[in-house]
Amino acid sequence: MLLKVAWSSLRSRKVTVLLTVFSIAVSVFLLLGVEHIRQEARSSFTRTVSGVDLIVGARTSPLNLLLYSVFRIGNATNNISWVSYEELAKSPQVAWTVPISLGDSHRGYRVMGTTNSYFEHYRYGEKRTLEFSAGKRFSDLYDLVLGSEVARKFNYNMGELVVVAHGTGKVSFSKHDDKPFRVTGILEPTGTAVDETLHVSLEAIEAIHKGWQSGTKLTVRSGLNVPAPHQKSDDGENAVAEHVNPELTPVSITAFMVGLKSKFAVFTFQRQVNEFSAEPLSAILPGAALSELWQMMSFFEKLLLLISLLVLFSSLLGMVVLLLATMRERQREMAIIRAVGGSPIFIFLLIQLEATLIVLSASVLGSLLLWGSLYLSADFLRRSGGIVIGTDIWNGNSLLIIGGVFLATSLLGLIPSVAAFRSCLHRGLTERG
């Protein structure tokens, strides 16, 4: 009966109640959204790379090096010469290296030149290896391995030809259309920046830029010994692993990842790189750089959370004001309830239940708004920031937040509930007197 009376009472004031519900729903949306995006962004960044001891690049800040080499965000300040890379890679402390070369793109997605060691040694999440949903790694010069999101977005299948563009813009008028790549592999989804990347060999990066200067294709290309796309050379091979064609040996790379034979050698090798005399280089620990990123973001996270809490508090106060403002209008309703045997406790519980129903409706609406917003913006966040945000908004923290909202509702709801209770008691005493 109590629920039926509360529902009928709210329906009789549906316009003001709906406005209050929407106001609280926006607050719940903000509060849950800030917490969910904070957790998902941290998880997305943390699981992108694991098992890498150091990342080496041109001298820059640790955060910038981490962002462009792992998350494909931003650009390198300079490149590393191939000679320097080979010298450092031959260090007795080094177990393996993964060189990477950035600078080209395909319809807004980054193209990364690397070697087959990338598929052997790169790890993400809990040291999970890269798996292929179709095809295999590089074997010919113009082979292309797609990240899962790129393949899904453009509906690319095995064997299709893909043209990459010079530069990293979404729109480019400088395309390497004379040397298209053939899709020979598609990776399983990882939930990381790998899904947004097109992978080619370092030799292929050199091959497509032969005859280019300062981002412009030259008309004269004589003297270049570059294999034609998807054709074998005279010896029947078009390999990418051993630099068969000396002209395709890279001049420089963007960065490289390092795995060491011993974890105790990390700081020794890092110091060796930082003091490298041939050119200014930086070696960073991915975990330390991520910690620096979270320290920079912590202030903004707390600020956004505080703003969301203040918005929620103001919305709940608005609900309390609504319930108090309608008490005078509901004198007749309260009198009828009292006439049919409703006690002051019944009135007290009625007001509390009305507040709970309003917040329950607002919580459901706010959650649906958040889920819909995440679903619609997921692709934009992937492409613009390389951040994978899931749509599963319910976890331990979100349940605690909703629980806190209902607790605050119960406490603030005491104001109109106690006012109604005291009014009924006073009226009852007056009638008896």
Image (tube, helix red, strand yellow):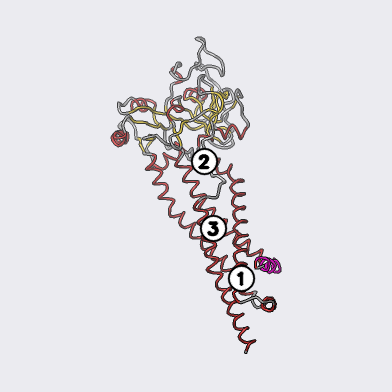
**Which amino acid type is marked by label 3?**
Ile
Q: CA distance from mark 2 to mark 3?
A: 29 Å
Q: Is residue 127 left or right of residue 163?
A: left
Q: Which residues are magenta?
A: 3-14
Residue contact at pointers 1 and 2, CB within 8 angstroms: no
Whole-percent x, y for residue 362 in the image = 61, 60
At mark 1, the secondary structure is helix
User: Of the numbered discs in the image, which one, if any, rests on residue 402?
Assistant: 3
User: Of the numbered discs in the image, which one, if any, rests on residue 139?
Assistant: none
In the rendered image, the quadrant that contains the N terminus is bottom right
Between 305 and 3, which is closer to the camera in this rendering? 3
Front of the two marks 3 and 1: 1
**Which amino acid type is marked by label 1?**
Ile
User: Of the numbered discs in the image, which one, if any, rests on residue 386?
Assistant: 2
Q: Tell me what residue is drawn at x 62 percent, y 52 percent.
A: 368
Q: Residues within 10 Å of mark 3 (few under 14, many from 20)?
A: some
Front of the two marks 1 and 2: 1
Is 399 situated above or below 204? Answer: below
At mark 2, the secondary structure is loop
Q: Earlier in the sequence, mark 3 or mark 1?
A: 1
Find disc 1 in the rendering and name its residue: 351
Chief secondary structure of the magenta span?
helix
Residue 10 among those drawn in magenta: yes
Residue 269 among those drawn in magenta: no
